[in-house]
Image (cartoon, rainbow, N blue to C red):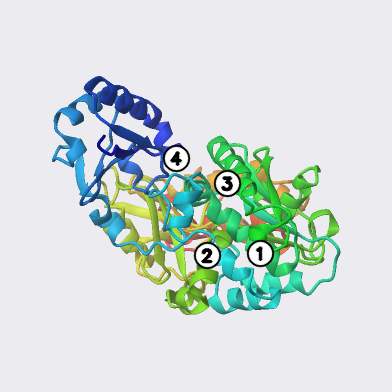
Amino acid sequence: MTQAIKIFVPIDAAALAVGADETALAISQEASRRGANVQVVRNGSRGMLWLEPMVEIQTPKGRVAYGPVQAEDVAGLFEAGWLEGSKHSLCHGLTEEIPYLAKQQRLTFARVGITDPLSLGDYQSLGGFEGLKKALTLAPEAIVEEVIQSGLRGRGGAAFPTGIKWKTVLGTPAEQKYIVCNADEGDSGTFSDRMLMEGDPYVLIEGMTIAGLAVGANYGYIYVRSEYPQAIAVLNSAIENARSVGWLGHDIGGSGRAFDLEVRVGAGAYICGEETSLLESLEGKRGQVRAKPPLPAIAGLFGKPTVINNVISLASVPTILAKGAAFYRDYGMGRSKGTLPFQLAGNIKHGGLVEMAFGLTLRELLYDFGGGSATGKPLRAVQVGGPLGAYLPESQWDVPLDYEAYIGISAMLGHGGLVAFDDSVDMAKMAQYAMEFCAVESCGKCTPCRIGSVRGVEVIEKIRNGQQRDQQVELLHDLCDTMLGGSLCALGGMTPYPVLSALEHFPEDFGLEKTPQPAAHA
């Protein structure tokens, strides 16, 4: 009997949202009707979201991409000979040669979209668990040093050196320590955590296990937002699979060393993406920010030393251990080492995930990858780093995407999310929305955030309505200074970034003629 032809249909939530399950069913039914010997494999997404559902056919030359493929397209594709990789209006050629993908530098996302996310065989055939095997041969101090030397910094937004955090936990004596993964990906325009958890869950499990070995922790928690049911289901299955073959549990890989973990589901509060609020929530309390010190690395979950890192931070660790710190450090620029999965969203023609080394520019992402606006109108502003990120005008699109370079222009890279706006956007309205978002999502613990955001909405509304405009602009600057300097966490402390950047770069939208004073630096 001839070998079955593999047909890959993503099980990623973005693909499911546009009919991937129906497409997969139609393929199975049409193949059965025609007597074609096919095997439908549910993979992760390649990250070219405008092509979803993107179906790939395994051919002798490689995988050929077709998309977007709806259920009603399937019969015609079979008729056109797509099982042989034949040309069709939905055909994009060999997947690996699609420019959007071919130009990327995929390290953390190297397997995403290629493998069956839950296949341990697929994972190990493409380098899975090599980093963990290396870690099992090293002393905890050596693992931590490797991560320090790699230059890896927190990918959740704060950009704190990951290895230094681990070193603090390692050096804090305690009978019990924890590893916590912050998978509460609540920023607008971000989806890299979700794509990785759904498309390559074992790399996160491996990274957390290495972290446990590095600091002396034997238990971990993945805190996932409830809005990610697909990721939660994939993670739970992956944890069971890893445990069943000895990559989690009391005897990791036959080493005699222990580490296990579980998934905990958050209830949807944006503030629980802040690490101390997340810990409060994990402990069964209301998600409110804790005052620091003590740092979570000293007294974190249940008062014990805790490593708390973002999904992408932890998922980057296996590559560093497997290939060495120097390999990872060779990517990037300045103090921004390695790669970052940038996420293109908003009014953009080719939205999706682009993993590249630090140092490229926003203009390259928007046009070389994104293809400009979806509407065909000129792009006017881009919010980088989530709802607390600054709005950047075209004059700043050539600044290298680097943590320090962005601090220099009163902006931040955050989690790597980009939301693009064309020239129809009202930036005064967007500034008001930033304050509204803060008011709704504030945990209420500190006054500058809880009250300041409400006053901010009122003040911007008065500016937009032309009520005592000059006095209100001065008041808005004072209010932002108070929030920047007096808030307990980044929610109140960074809400001024989108507000002040909109005011500085787009004063005409506020009814102002001259440019107000520059955005304050944190």
State the image coordinates of residue 495 (x, y, percent, origin top left): 60, 55
The one nearer the camera, 349 or 391, is: 349
Under mark 3, the amino acid is Gly
State the image coordinates of residue 27 (x, y, percent, origin top left): 30, 28
Q: In the rendered image, which residue does mark 4 sit on?
A: 12
Q: Which of the 4 image quadrants contains residue 241?
A: top right
Spatial CA span between label 2 and label 1 = 14 Å
Marks 4, 3: nearer the viewer: 4
Which label sits on residue 327?
Answer: none
Spatial CA span between label 2 and label 4 = 25 Å
The one nearer the camera, 48 or 93, is: 93
Q: In the rendered image, which residue does mark 2 sit on?
A: 130
Which label sits on residue 211?
Answer: 1
Spatial CA span between label 1 and label 4 = 27 Å
Q: In the rendered image, which residue does mark 3 sit on?
A: 186
Question: On the picture, is 23 further left or further right than 78?
Answer: right
State the image coordinates of residue 506 (x, y, percent, origin top left): 42, 56
Under mark 1, the amino acid is Ala
Residue positioned 64% across, 68% down in the render: 136
Residue positioned 21% across, 37% down in the render: 83
